[in-house]
Amino acid sequence: MTGNGRLRLALASKSPARLATLQAAGFDPLVQVSDVDEEALLESVRGGPAQKVLALATAKARAVAYDAREAAGAHIVVGCDSMFEFDGEAVGKPGNPEKARDRIARMAGRSGLLHTGHQIVHLESGASLGAVSHAVVHFAPMSDAEVEAYVATGEPLHVAGAFTVDGLGGPFVERVDGDYHGVVGISLPLLRAMLANWGVSITRLWQPPVKLAGDAAHSPAVESVLAAADGTPSDNSIDSGAAGVADASGAAGLLAAGSGRPKPGSKPHSGRRRKGADGFILCPCGSEHWGLAGAAGILAFRERESIEVLVQLRAEWSHSGGTWSNPGGAIGWSETPLEGALREFEEETAIGADSLDVVGSIVRDHGDWRYTTFAARCETAEPVPNDESLALEWAPLDDLLEGRLDRPVHPAFAEDLPRLAEVIRGAAS
Ligand SMILES: [Zn+2]
């Protein structure tokens, strides 16, 4: 695939509202739905609604992306799932008129939070990215007769949250704070941001007959884009000044650079088949982070002449390779941060929970993504590194704090260190 041709989207969802949204935006996606045991997955996710929708979106997208037959003809698969949170509870499909009437009467005149999880997978490189959109939905006060009439239409019975914003329920939604399309089922601005994170312009998703900027009948600009999409050479240089072409030519980035088969030992950006909550999430802070369900690790310490902490020089191929930090990684959908931290720590150091005494923790909270670091006393065990470490060493805490190590300290870890040092010193004798 070239760096500026058209890209075809596959929608891993059978929601007509999502399809209509994408079609209206000019994307004409292929619809591919795979079987995902949603109930079982939801049961296993420990986090709140935002985590649940991201877990389901991820499972749907991967089910299609990892099946070559299903993904045929598409370049990027997108999976989505939505959940409405009201009074602190996830509100599913009411299923029967009594429940629907009860819920709608309760929601009228009040507001709730709509979460939509998104997962995109680039088929050729295997790159993937998750993200969650949130919007506050304000309902108008409704008369009993209106509630009755809306329930009688049958529409609210079969939709999450017992309402639609793009259908018969529309008149009763007074206001949306956040992205409207996220409430319908797929956030177009978020999809744009996710693709932009890969260096890809969303304008590349436009399919014929969308007219690109400056599209006179046979504009050279359009022909050059189409030629690029077909992979055939074009005599037209891409400097016509047409906006669509300018965007397209700027969209080299990861997808162009990362085309070709995944190489073993390459960074997690490129093509491994992800499992569970392993993967990148585009955070509201604007960065991508590792761990769809968040991440966690352990900073082990021991008291010798001074306080020493166990630090890991991450292997070059890994995320943040070549920097010092504490052992840790992505937690699983069903794990608590502590469970995930202990598992990751044992994988990377061969030191089990029996040899650790957790004395405290700190959290780096980015909303949809969190990193929890546990401080744990470890007086007797010695680490055995796996392939994720270039080195695994006991270093004096003061050397770490003052940057006296031979390689850089991971910036986020460096930021957390003073608080971690406080926790450790508070627990030391
Ligand atoms: Zn962040």
Image (tube, rainbow, N blue to C red):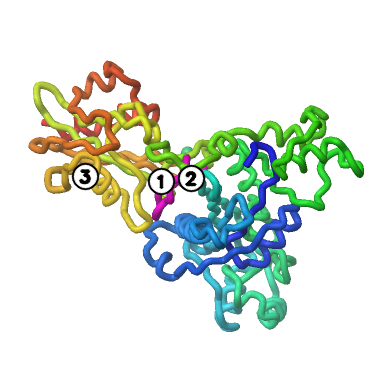
User: Along the line of sight, which residue is nearer the eye, 264 or 243?
Assistant: 264
| Residue at point 50%, 63% (across, down) | 87
- Against 179, residue 67 (above or below) is below
Crowding at label 2, few (<14), some or many (≥20) Cα neighbours within 10 Å? Answer: many
Q: Is residue 68 left or right of residue 342?
A: right
Q: Name the residue under label 2.
A: 281
User: Which mark identifies residue 346?
Assistant: 3
Q: Label 3, secondary structure: give it.
A: helix
State the quadrant of the N terminus.
Answer: top right
- Against 179, residue 350 (above or below) is above
- Is residue 278 one of those drawn in magenta? yes
* Tag 2: amino acid: Ile
- Against 50, residue 388 (above or below) is above
Question: Which stretch did the figure color magenta?
Answer: 270-282
User: Along the line of sight, which residue is nearer the eye, 119 or 238?
Assistant: 238
Q: Quadrant of residue 373?
A: top left
Give the mark nearer the N terminus: 1 vs 3: 1
Q: Mark 1 points at which residue?
A: 291
* Tag 1: amino acid: Gly
Q: Are marks 1 and 2 in contact (CB under 8 Å)?
A: yes
* Tag 3: amino acid: Glu
Q: In this view, does 5 lie to the left or right of 59?
A: right
| Residue 66 in sight | yes
Q: CA separation, marks 1 and 3? A: 18 Å
Q: Label 2, secondary structure: give it.
A: strand
| Residue at point 43%, 39% (across, down) | 263
